[in-house]
Image: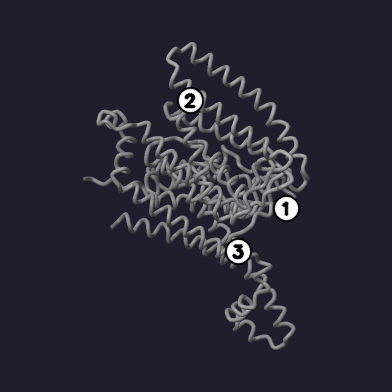
């Protein structure tokens, strides 16, 4: 009962913080923060599945998020037919070569028993594969990237509704997690963290430099939306009538027809942006609730109890006949899939794919703070952490500037100390994040909403 009350109070405080932003800053900003908080909460759930359930340290979070963002491009963008004609078949052939090389290496590892012969055959297979790739891949890439590079210069996508990419992003991230997990999950926890960070950097470097796939640092803009466009809403009769009905008291006080029409036009323009953000909120909340439902079912199932037993004592679980590697691989794939879904949702919300914006250390650090502050092992705690930390990340700058203004109010405008403090105020964001983390670890080491231990 006390735990439930703490949870309710925590989320109620978070709700009032968002309301306060709407009242004192703007409702558009409040909704924008709310939508990003929802996506942050989903990312935190993905990390919580890996760390809170199984104790796996994944520092490569941004790599899986970026893969989800790429899925949004590959699903929603129309195919560039000229680029496909110029080099698409070369890319497909290169992909087949890679798959054949991987299959041959797999067979060599399975069939050849002698270590020396095995290594020689694998080495020769890789060399031959690289020679073939160099023959087909490089000319294909050059041909594709030469097709109108200012606007396209890549193959494009499937031209499907972008909301499908939310599922595809999860599948892409899960597939990459399966490959990474088979290579890295045998490592000790600290080596696993370093390996996942390195792989994340590799993924993002590929997305930055392989223009034929993602346009690289040129970015993909103007992605389609799963919600209406503001300019279209402003022309819909039902929307204009709705805004007129909501603001009837305000409009009725104006006598002049021209002034009333001008006010209504401004209200429609302002409300269209809010309506679009509310539509996004509805979609994001739906996905968050679905993921939360399945996470809770998994956590409270025999599988979840087994994962926690492996997390708490691997040796004992291994002695009971549990396949530690297999279970770790499962949970690593599931958590990465959730991160891929969140990545596709973030790209959809932004309306653009910018590989340069994925900064593994900075944003991975933020997501881990969300899980630690909220409470690892507790799904609701991770969601609360996602909301609170992202809210603080956005509002830290204006709060710091306001605090510095109060602190230096007695100083003259020409004071060098005042100008230095005011210029430094926006950079206090990282300091505040670190301070929140330290305070949490000192006074609430298990998080605001700690994991519930059920005794059977």
Per the rendering, the mark at residue 133 is: none
Q: How far apart are marks 3 and 1 (CA)?
A: 33 Å
On residue 28, which mark appears?
3
Q: Which residue is outermost to the bottom?
A: 255
User: Which residue sits at x=51%, y=15%?
Assistant: 119
Q: Distance between the residues labelled 3 and 2?
A: 54 Å
The location of residue 422, given as percent across then percent down, is 67, 49
Residue at 61%, 47% (x, y): give it: 74
Where residue 354 appears, as percent x and y from the top left, is 65, 45
Residue 187 in the image: above or below residue 172: above
Q: Nearer the viewer, residue 351 or 449?
A: 351
Place of residue 219 in the rendered image (x, y in percent of width and height, measured from the top left): 69, 46
- Please identify, in this view, whether the residue under mark 2 or under mark 1 is nearer the observer: 2
251 relative to 334, above or below: below
- Looking at the image, residue 30 lies above or below residue 430: below
Q: Which of marks 3 and 1 is in front?
A: 3
Secondary structure under the numbered disc 1 in the rendered image: loop
* Circle 3 residues within 10 Å: few <14, some 14–19, many ≥20: some
Question: 310 left or right of 240?
Answer: left
Q: Which of 307 and 25 is in front in this view?
A: 307
Q: How far, Cα to Cα, is label 2 from label 1?
A: 71 Å
**Quarter the N terminus occupies:** bottom left
Nearest the camera: 149 or 268? 149
Which residue position holds label 2? 106
Q: Mark 1 points at which residue?
A: 413
């Amino acid at each position: 009962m006390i735990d439930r009350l703490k949870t309710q109070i925590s989320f109620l405080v978070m709700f009032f913080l968002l309301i306060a932003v709407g009242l004192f800053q703007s409702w558009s900003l409040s909704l924008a923060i709310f939508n990003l908080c929802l996506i942050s909460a989903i990312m935190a759930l993905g990390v919580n599945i890996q760390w809170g359930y199984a104790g796996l340290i994944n520092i490569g979070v941004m790599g899986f998020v970026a893969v989800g963002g790429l899925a949004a491009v590959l699903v929603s963008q129309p195919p560039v037919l000229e680029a496909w004609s110029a080099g698409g078949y070369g890319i497909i052939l290169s992909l087949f070569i890679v798959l054949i090389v991987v299959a041959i290496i797999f067979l060599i590892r399975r069939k050849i028993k002698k270590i020396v012969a095995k290594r020689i055959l694998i080495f020769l297979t890789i060399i031959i594969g690289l020679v073939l790739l160099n023959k087909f891949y490089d000319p294909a890439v050059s041909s594709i990237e030469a097709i109108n590079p200012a606007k396209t210069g890549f193959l494009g996508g499937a031209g499907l509704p972008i909301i499908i990419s939310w599922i595809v992003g999860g599948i892409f991230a899960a597939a990459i997690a399966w490959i990474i997990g088979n290579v890295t999950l045998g490592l000790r926890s600290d080596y696993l963290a370093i390996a996942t960070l390195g792989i994340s950097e590799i993924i993002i470097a590929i997305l930055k430099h392989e223009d034929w796939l993602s346009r690289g640092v040129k970015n993909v803009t103007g992605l389609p939306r799963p919600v209406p466009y503001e300019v279209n809403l402003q022309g819909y009769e039902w929307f204009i009538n709705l805004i007129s009905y909501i603001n009837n008291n305000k409009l009725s006080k104006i006598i002049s027809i021209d002034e009333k029409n001008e006010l209504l036009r401004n209200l429609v323009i302002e409300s269209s942006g809010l309506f679009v953000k509310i539509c996004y909120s509805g979609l994001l909340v739906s996905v968050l609730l679905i993921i939360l439902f399945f996470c809770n079912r998994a956590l409270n199932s025999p599988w979840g109890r087994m994962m926690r037993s492996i997390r708490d004592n691997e040796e004992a679980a291994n002695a009971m006949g549990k396949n530690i590697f297999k279970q770790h691989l499962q949970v690593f794939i599931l958590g990465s899939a959730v991160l891929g879904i969140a990545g596709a949702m973030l790209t959809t919300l932004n309306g653009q794919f910018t590989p340069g914006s994925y900064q593994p250390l900075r944003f991975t650090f933020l997501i881990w703070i969300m899980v630690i502050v909220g409470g690892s092992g507790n799904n609701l705690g991770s969601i609360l952490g996602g909301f609170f930390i992202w809210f603080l990340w956005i509002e830290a700058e204006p709060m710091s500037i306001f605090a510095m203004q109060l602190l230096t109010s007695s100083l003259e405008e020409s004071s060098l100390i005042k100008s230095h403090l005011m210029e430094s105020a926006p950079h206090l964001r990282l300091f505040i994040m670190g301070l929140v983390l330290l305070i949490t670890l000192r006074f609430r080491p298990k998080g605001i909403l700690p994991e519930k231990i059920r005794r059977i």
